[in-house]
Image (cartoon, rainbow, N blue to C red):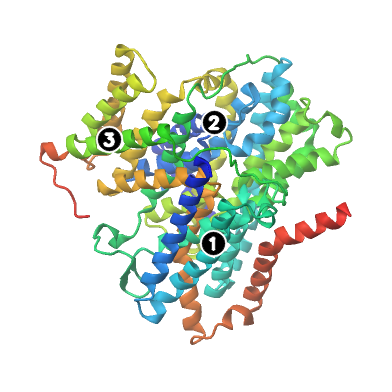
Amino acid sequence: MLEAISMALSAVFTPVGVVVIILGTIAGLIFGVLPGLGGIVAVAVLMPFTFGMEPMVAMLFLAAVMGAVPFGGSIPAILINTPGTAPNAATCFDGYPMARRGESKRALGISAVASGLGAIFGLVILVAFFPVVRQLVLAFGPPEFFMLVLIGLATVALAAKGNLLKGLVAGGTGVLLSLIGYSSVFGILRFTGKSEYLWDGIELVPFVVGIFALSEVINYTLRGGKITAMATSTAGSVWQGAKDVFRHKLTFLRSSAIGTGIGIIPGVGGTAANFISYVVAKTSSRTPEIFGTGTPEGVIASESSNNAKDGGALLPTVGFGIPGSGEMAVLLGAFILHGLQPGPMLVREHPEIVFALLLGILLSNILASSFGLLMANQLARVSMLDVRFIAPIVTVLCFVGAYAIRGNIWDVLMALGCGIFGYAMLKSGFPIVCLVIGFVLGVLAERAFHQSLMMSYGSYMIFFSRPASLLLFIVLIVVLFFPFINMIVKRRKSE
Amino acid sequence: MNKLNKGRIAFSAFLLALALFMVIVSLSYEAKPSFFPLIVGVATILMTVPVLVDDIHPIPLLRRLDISIMGASSGDSLDDRGEQIFNRGVLLLVMSLIGFFILVLLAGFYLGIAIFTFIFLKTKRRGGWFQSVITAAIVVGLVYLIFGLGMKGLFLFEGIFFGEILPSI
């Protein structure tokens, strides 16, 4: 482990490493400040630009992007009551009232310190559990992996905003789309028709670029106007905000722990962590009535949890190849793009890449917090740009990004088709995150399923006879029936 | 039935048709390669049918399966049923994106980007001539910097008009 850490350190502290971390941090801050874009779009749009980079450098860059997005998102949440990303939504509740009464710098100070320390908390937990994860992943076989994939899909459907059934339909559609093309398990072509283009299946990058970014471009352009209509000045003391975090250390520790814990659950992501931390902070506070009126505790709870979740979300992503969040699903694509297979093999054979990711996230959080404090006003002005000015630039980035991956012009058409498909999904109330996670996990699930059957000579009992697999199956059932259980509990309470 | 419902119904029906198509096609494969798509396809169909029915005529039970961000059942629909999916504005925008793709196909990335960015800014944003031209030039310049110079070995598509050959589809 020490050798891996020193390898990662030597990759980070080179001129190239430092430059990509700075560039990634700036890009992440910009994507974070622009409401609606967020971490998933940032990683999806910027991933093609890592093509041609060394895997370690590419991972550093993407980690820096992911690390900086949450703090970037808190800036418009505090200054103009518009969360830059969904996991910053709860920051508006107290951050904006603070800004309105002239304490915007204090709120930004809280956000910067809580974000930076929250991320460190999550990463420390990850490093502490890393040896355990290594042991755990080695004990996991294909049946357990298959069950874990199913749990991942179910929890994503459950956690996504919208209808559970629609989440599952989106996940199922994603799995089906992932099966198009050459099957390495059976050595045959499936669902390709007469198309040669589809022999390799639907390429991940055009798919995610279209689904996340182009659909958002359509959404934005139609809405028109400026991203936000108002702005406030930053006033108050940044240092006072920094001290607030240490004054409310219990709130900080509890929220960071919640963020890390929720991050570990595949697919749940930062939005749930953000709201749950906020609600827990409010209900456990001695003065819950001041939450929502501009209390520092509210900002601490929200910002520490949404940064701590990255460390947690990295655990299932690198350890099992199961994305811990939407960003991690796209990051899995980046791993594959650079010839790295996420999961037990990566942990065993390339631990230095895992530590490079951790260092990238850590350093970008520290950089983003420092940079953000100095440049908060300037960054917030990006949100005042006309969306119709940003739209063609993002479209160009999407088209070029989709093409760059393998130099096939039809990938651009695929991204465009996926963009229209994603927009229709969005407007029909289908959570697109479920579609993408289904798409990423589909082929892996099929492989694990057939490997399991090969192990058991065709007996399906292998999924229920192994203790870990059976336990995961029970968890799956509980997850799937959660809305019904919740409905019954609510009805009983109201009676 | 208003426009909105038609759009939602059409999209749910499209998803159903897609799953149905994949199930039917997978029946033509041998047992093992067809097993997984069959299972997932049938499960997706079974879940899409109530969604489609709900789009036509809301089912109260399904509304109760709406999940809030907190992961709890809210009992109220989170779908914005008042929003239209495809209207004139969406179709125009989609057409302009398709137009951009055709431009790239014919004239290549650099020319396509310049023309698309300029026309988009001039028409959608109603920007001034000078600002639109300068912005388009900056965008092309940035793409050239990143791809033309930054990523050596990667050549952006130059367009059929300039002798580029289309890969097989």
Report the front residue among A386 and A164.
A164
> Residue B120, how many percent across, how many down?
33, 25
Identify the secondary structure beneath mark 2: loop
Q: Looking at the image, which residue is at 29% across and 31% down?
A: B143
Q: Position of residue A452 (x, y in %)?
A: 51, 78
Q: In this figure, which residue is indicated by the disc labeled 3?
A: B99
The residue tagged 2 is A35
Q: Amino acid at mark 1?
A: Val
Instruction: State whether residue A255 is above or below residue A471.
Output: above
Q: Is residue A108 above or below residue A411?
A: above
Percent position of residue A136, x then y: 61, 67
> Alpha carbon of mark 2 to alpha carbon of mark 3: how far?
27 Å
Tell me the subunit letter for badge 1: B
User: The disc numbered 2 marks a residue on which chain?
Assistant: A
The vertical placement of A17 against A258, above or below, is above
**What's under tag 2, amino acid-wise?**
Pro
Q: Circle 2: is it few (<14), some (14-19), or many (20+) Cα within 10 Å?
A: many
- The picture places residue A415, in percent across and down from the top left corner, at 35, 45
Q: Nearer the viewer, residue A360 or B56?
A: B56
Residue at x 75%, y 33% (from the top left corner): A298
The nearer-to-camera label among 1 and 2 is 1
